[in-house]
Amino acid sequence: MMTNAAGEPTALVTNIQKYTIHDGPGIRTEIFFKGCNMRCIWCSNPETLSALPQLGVYPAKCLGRQKCGRCAGACPQAGSPIRFDADGVIKSIDFAEYCEGCLRCAQACPAGAVKIWGTSMTVPELMKIILEDKAYYERSGGGVTLSGGEVLLSAEFAELLLKECKKEGVGTCVESALNVPWERAQAVLRLTDLLITDIKHMNAEKHREYTGSGNERILRNIKKAAEFGVKILLRTPVVPGFNDDDENMRATGAYIRDELGGAVIQYQLLPYRKMGTEKYASLCMEYPIGDRAVVPRGEWENKIAELAAMLTDEFGIPAAAGSGNKLPL
Ligand code: SF4
Ligand code: SF4
């Protein structure tokens, strides 16, 4: 576990979203941890993939090198990693060649044109933010959701944080792909009221091709979580041409019915939409899915609704289209 100069446990957080309503019951505070051990080609949160702090560059916010230039002035490499266009507007940062990752350019920028992704935070710092909205959680049946990236790569820290939430009577939800050793997941799930996890594909090779990782450990862990007694909100991000065929959908329905008992309170089919393009550009990263999988929105949502109805009818599982359905808790 990481610690700060005072020896306190820390984790890198990319975002804290307040008043969220889709990732667990009621009104929630959602915390996104940095670092992920999968590489799904449709990922819309590229800033959470690396476990290290990163810089995002937003040219539209730049005041211009002539008027400002503080980033280049703060850079120990005499500004050489920072690229400007012909008008003196920041364009990119050459992370690969020259940048030593000191983050001074972002700290110096007065306009937010260079943003640091990944803030080191302690449990008390996060609890202070979480508890600001305790009254909302109590009124709505909400609480905190730990997400990512993959929060279970920071499992020891998550455990400490969830213990504090429990002490304060704050509801707990963990969103994880469960692609970690079971023991690491179990320690966190012990303190979790609701697990949000997903089945991306039932075929291991197809899963590996599109996510960088096989599905064997994930499916084993979902089954173990069901046996462990934690309530599960199961999801599939349905991506055109990857996992939307009848064969895969029926294999998923049979797995839920035959292997997970009554642990799944809802199985949500999430219609894939390409999001996060600006974040990829700011990080100088290619969006791996490119222009594949673009289907008109209405058409795609109808198909997802049909798939959900088919799964409910044929397998008797609580399938639903989208993440906006009320949870039976
Ligand atoms: S992170 Fe540091 S080395 Fe890299 S561009 Fe910014 S100031 Fe320069
Ligand atoms: S410090 Fe920020 S606003 Fe100023 S030139 Fe650099 S990127 Fe632009």
Image (tube, rainbow, N blue to C red):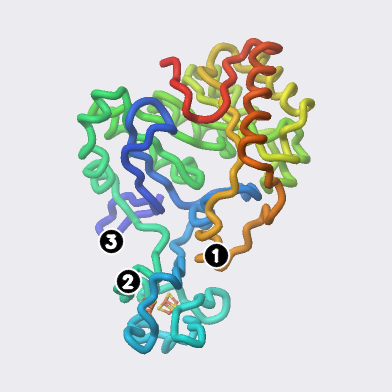
Distance from the alpha carbon under mark 1 to that under mark 2: 18 Å
Ligand 1 location (quadrant): bottom left
- Residue holding disc 1: 281
Q: Does the residue labelled 1 lie within 8 Å of ligand 2?
A: no
Distance from the alpha carbon under mark 3 to that under mark 1: 33 Å
User: Could you say where residue 261 lies in the image, as x and y percent from the top left?
Assistant: 59, 12
Q: CB under 8 Å between callouts 1 and 2?
A: no
User: Could you say where residue 328 lies in the image, as x and y percent from the top left?
Assistant: 44, 15
**Looking at the rendered structure, which numbered label has been put on residue 298?**
none
**Looking at the rendered structure, which numbered label has been put on residue 111?**
2
Between residues 329 and 309, which one lies in front from this camera angle?
309
- Looking at marks 3 and 2 on the same chain, the residue that comes earlier in the sequence is marked by 3
Going by the numbered disc 3, the residue's amino acid type is Ala
Going by the numbered disc 1, the residue's amino acid type is Ala
Going by the numbered disc 2, the residue's amino acid type is Ala
Q: Which residue is at a point 59% across and 44% down the rendered structure image?
A: 273
- Residue holding disc 3: 5
Q: Is residue 82 in sight in this rendering? A: yes
Between residues 290 and 156, which one lies in front from this camera angle?
290
Q: How crowded is mark 1: few (under 14 residues within 10 Å), some or many (20 or more)?
A: some
Q: How crowded is mark 3: few (under 14 residues within 10 Å), some or many (20 or more)?
A: few
Q: Is mark 2 within 8 Å of ligand 2?
A: yes
Q: In this view, does 76 lie above or below 257?
A: below
